[in-house]
Amino acid sequence: MHAPYVPQLRLYQDWLRERHGLTFSSYEHLWRWSVTDQEGFWQSIWDYDHLQSPTPHTAVLADAQMPGAIWFPGAQVNYAKQVFRHEKAADDAGMMSIVSENESRELAELSWPELRRRVAAFAETLRRHGVQRSDRVVACMPNIPETIIAFLACASIGAVWSVCAPDMGAQAIIDRFTQIDPKVLIAADGVVYAGRRVDRAKVIEALRTALPNLSTFLLYRSGLSDADIPHDAELREAMTSAPEAARTFEPEWLPFDQPLWIVYTSGTTGKPKPIVHGHGGVLLAAAAGGKNMDLAPSYEPNSFGERYHWYTTCGWIMWNAQVSGLLCGSTICLYDGSPSGPKEAPDFGTLWRFAARHRVSYFGAGAAFYEGCVKSGLDLSKQGDLSTLRALGTTGSPLSEAAQLWGIAEFDGNYRRRIWWMNMSGGTDVAANFVGANRELPQVPGRMQCRQLGSATESWDANGRSVTDEVGDLVCTKPLPSMPLYFWGDLDNTRYIDSYFREFPGVWRHGDWISIGKDGSCVIYGRSDATLNRSGLRMGTSEIYRPVESLPEVLDSMVIDLEYLGRQSHTELFVVLRESLRLHAALEERIREAIRTTLSPRFLPDRITQAPAIPRTLSGKKQEVPIKKLYLGRSAEDVLNRQAMANPECLDWYIEQARQHSRNFAARSD
């Protein structure tokens, strides 16, 4: 019989008491210490998680300004080195590093020594092709072990990684990768999603044409393309051709702020901004986050053989979070494909059956997935044995009370135990959480349990005052180690500062609406800016406008994404057509096809409406945020300033459209 499970946060607090004599009367007390004594807290994370450096750091936080905080100067680290510290213990316990499956039920399992062998072989391949520290390696790959192996190999030699999901259109990928001038491209020639085979040969050709400074192209043969694609090496061979490399393989020591990966903002204004995160900051964020997430090493008796799955594609920051399970010593379980089967015959049991087959203990997905399970009437008792599941994680958008109650009822009814919901909210921007969970706190469906350790998260009103039990801007008043080092190519930090510090200088404004209760629990109410958010995948409005406005019939357009607590987001696309034209079914389908092929089917609008004009400011900017607020129920007087508009005569039309939308929404809710 197993001993009672001890949560990771409890183990950490026991260590603080025994090592430093620190005791805390409540989680709120612990959280406040973590954000007021930043040096003490982050040093404790470094020590508790056994981060090592061949050279000592001269301070924990040498400069606390935002942006520009300086963390752990003098320290040297490496993400891959921290991963492989678990190898011997996990292998001795017979634990896998990665378990992977796709829609065809093709299974791949990698032991920890095999993971090291393949990472070592691919690192050697990169070196042979001239890849050096800080060179960029980009990938357009599905969520499979080879993608993680390639990333770890890059990390091991100090190359900078960047990945896009293969369901993105060529132009969306080009807009990202051209900004960082990569040396190496890795790409799959085909993918399967929702039972549909997609040949990616033409996308690869477009990428290679758009990236003239590429020196090496590595091809992942999927078996889904007949095209003869010129390449320098095949990815699988590059990962298995030098088995002897593992004998001498050792990830390099790198400066604490050595760039690790580049991820992207959504591109609300202009091209997506390339965010650079560093090795050290990501390591510390993952270590702190793992405690609130309650992720355990698979090989420790207290973990019951942790198997961690988070459904994601490579285009979402949750792919990075899934990989970070290796930093915690967990076995990570990947699923490549649609979480709900083909669109014409949706099956929300797909992921649950995957979890049952592989004895997953920790199951995560975007909130919209769970909403789909509820609406489809899914019965978990018919999806296999889920008795090993101990936690359900969610992020990406607000999770409704109904969905959380559904999960609690399903596990209580089928397994006679209370499932723990780990609801969190963070961002691509910081590769960390602002709001998280604690399995020892009460669960209130519809609310997130607490603020993340180390994150000085507050709700601020428009005047920069911290408020309680009121909806305000989510801000972080003190630096986090994983805040961006910079945006690639943003030499004077102008774009970086404008993105997060324009409203409140020296304070990070994230762009979410949040309410924080007196007990520290939180509710996220969605984005406060114009970003589109579909199941946690973000896309800026400007990326929608390019394909839509490239159609000869469309003169102008505007899109707003409406997020509601407990409901899927709803996207409205307004189009201004050439004179005398009217929106009809064929033109509407052409608009949708332009978005589908250029970007992704995930960002298709729920409704397309012909508008008389697009409201613009005197400087010519589309007024997406005021119109979005109008649709979410705010009064026109509160959100619109006619004197600041170039075409105020069009506002009455939008006000009436918003009223109709509100009436229709209320009717649907009833």
Image (spheres, rainbow, N blue to C red):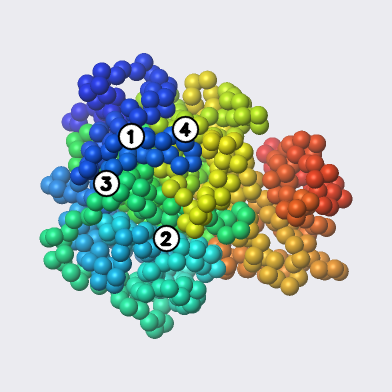
Callout 4–callout 1 Cβ contact below 8 Å: no
Question: Horizontally, is 270 left or right of 308 in the view?
Answer: right
Callout 4, which amino acid? Lys
**Circle 2 is placed at which residue position?**
163
Residue under the point 23% across and 66% down:
124
Decide which of tag 3 and tag 4 comes sooner along the chain. Answer: 3
Mark 3: give few (<14), some (14-19) or many (20+) Cα within 10 Å. many
**From mark 4 to mark 2, how far is it between C-alphas?**
29 Å
| Front residue of 164 and 306 | 164
Decide which of tag 2 and tag 1 comes sooner along the chain. Answer: 1
**Circle 1 is placed at which residue position?**
60
Query: Taking 38 as reference, is 202 above or below it?
Result: below
**Circle 3 is placed at which residue position?**
76
Q: Tag 1, which secondary structure?
A: loop
| Percent x, y of residue 330 | 27, 45
Q: Tag 2, which secondary structure?
A: strand
Residue under the point 32% across and 41% down:
73
Callout 3, which amino acid? Gln
Q: Could one spot residue 306 in this view of the protein?
A: no
**From mark 3 to mark 4, how far is it between C-alphas?**
24 Å
Question: Horizontally, is 630 left or right of 178 in the view?
Answer: right
Residue under the point 35% across and 74% down:
216
